[in-house]
Image (tube, grey):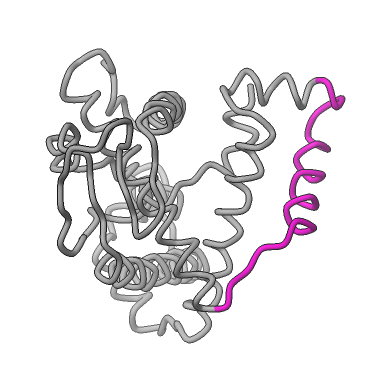
């Protein structure tokens, strides 16, 4: 299946970061249009496709049975909210990245696709997996492009981020139950590298969230009136921090 193998290039920002903090958002009746971000319009058809894709991704990457019943109305609202916010942030990220001098070339995308192809026994298997995942080559290229943009932005933001020994020790003491268990004990020195990596990522995510929040404040966003209830729903966070912390011990 494509979903586990191509997970790296699924647009995960919304699942990793917290609840979106938008500026002023207006709602309007727009025939066939789900939303407008700046001058870019997203059709209802594209929104419906994004909902289907988000539903499949959440089902595959579900943690701890969080979404056990997708047929329940509340769960489906969360999925629709996740899809809507993905579409909005996708536009904001590409627009903001270009202004910040972060660009992705076609050659960079081709290189990543070739890396992915090597994970499959044949070209036919590669394309079959894409189809099974409900994607096209165009969709894959779009996801790769966006992921590379995100990585470029994060690299710039993380260039000035540091984690001190004091922060590592404080994290260890605060989460001692993770590291000291009856069947196994992980000392501070043993966990230090993993904790540093985690805190660097956490600070990087926070820096990216701040950057993205700023982008949300400076661009006009108009949502179809029919999606107002969806916009008010909190998107999923993927519980990334919990899972990452468990990997530290």
140 vs 119, nearest the viewer? 140
Say which quarter of the image contains residue 5: top right
152 vs 225, nearest the viewer? 225
Q: Where is residue 208? Give x, y as percent.
A: 39, 68
- The residue under the point 26% across, 56% down is 221
Horizontally, residue 216 falls left or right of residue 193, namely: left
Say which quarter of the image contains residue 164: bottom left
Say which quarter of the image contains residue 138: top right
Horizontally, residue 40 falls left or right of residue 173, namely: right
- The residue under the point 50% across, 61% down is 94
Give the magenta range: 101-124
Q: Where is residue 211? Give x, y as percent.
A: 36, 72
Q: Where is residue 74? Give x, y as percent.
A: 16, 24
Horizontally, residue 65 falls left or right of residue 92, namely: left
- The residue under the point 33% across, 69% down is 215
Q: Where is residue 245? Give x, y as percent.
A: 38, 53
Q: Is residue 191 above or below residue 32?
A: below
Most distant residue in the top direction: 71
- The residue under the point 47% across, 65% down is 95
171 vs 220, nearest the viewer? 220
Q: Is residue 25 above or below residue 226?
A: below
| Screen quadrant of the N terminus | top right
Residue 116 in magenta?
Answer: yes
Horizontally, residue 78 falls left or right of residue 124, namely: left
> How many numbered marks have been drawn onto this rendered protein structure?
0
Residue 131 in magenta?
Answer: no
């Amino acid at each position: 299946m494509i979903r586990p193998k191509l997970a790296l290039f699924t647009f995960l920002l919304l699942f990793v970061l917290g609840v979106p903090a938008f500026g002023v958002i207006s709602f309007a009746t727009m025939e066939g249009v789900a939303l407008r971000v700046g001058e870019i319009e997203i059709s209802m058809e594209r929104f419906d496709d994004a909902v289907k894709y988000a539903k499949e991704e959440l089902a595959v990457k579900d943690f701890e049975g969080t979404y056990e019943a997708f047929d329940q109305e509340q769960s489906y609202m969360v999925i629709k909210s996740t899809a809507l916010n993905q579409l909005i942030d996708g536009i904001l990220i590409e627009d903001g990245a270009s202004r910040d001098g972060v660009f992705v070339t076609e050659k960079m995308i081709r290189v990543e696709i070739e890396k992915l192809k090597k994970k499959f026994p044949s070209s036919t298997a590669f394309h079959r997996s894409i189809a099974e995942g409900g994607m096209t080559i165009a969709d894959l290229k779009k996801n790769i492009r966006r992921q590379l943009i995100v990585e470029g932005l994060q690299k710039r933001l993380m260039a000035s981020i540091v984690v001190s020994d004091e922060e590592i020790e404080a994290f260890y003491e605060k989460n001692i139950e993770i590291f000291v268990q009856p069947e196994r004990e992980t000392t501070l020195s043993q966990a230090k590298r993993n904790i540093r990596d985690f805190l660097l990522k956490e600070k990087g995510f926070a820096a990216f969230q701040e950057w993205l929040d700023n982008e949300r404040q400076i661009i006009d966003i108009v949502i179809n009136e029919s999606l107002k209830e969806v916009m008010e729903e909190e998107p999923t966070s993927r519980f990334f921090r919990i899972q990452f912390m468990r990997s530290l011990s």
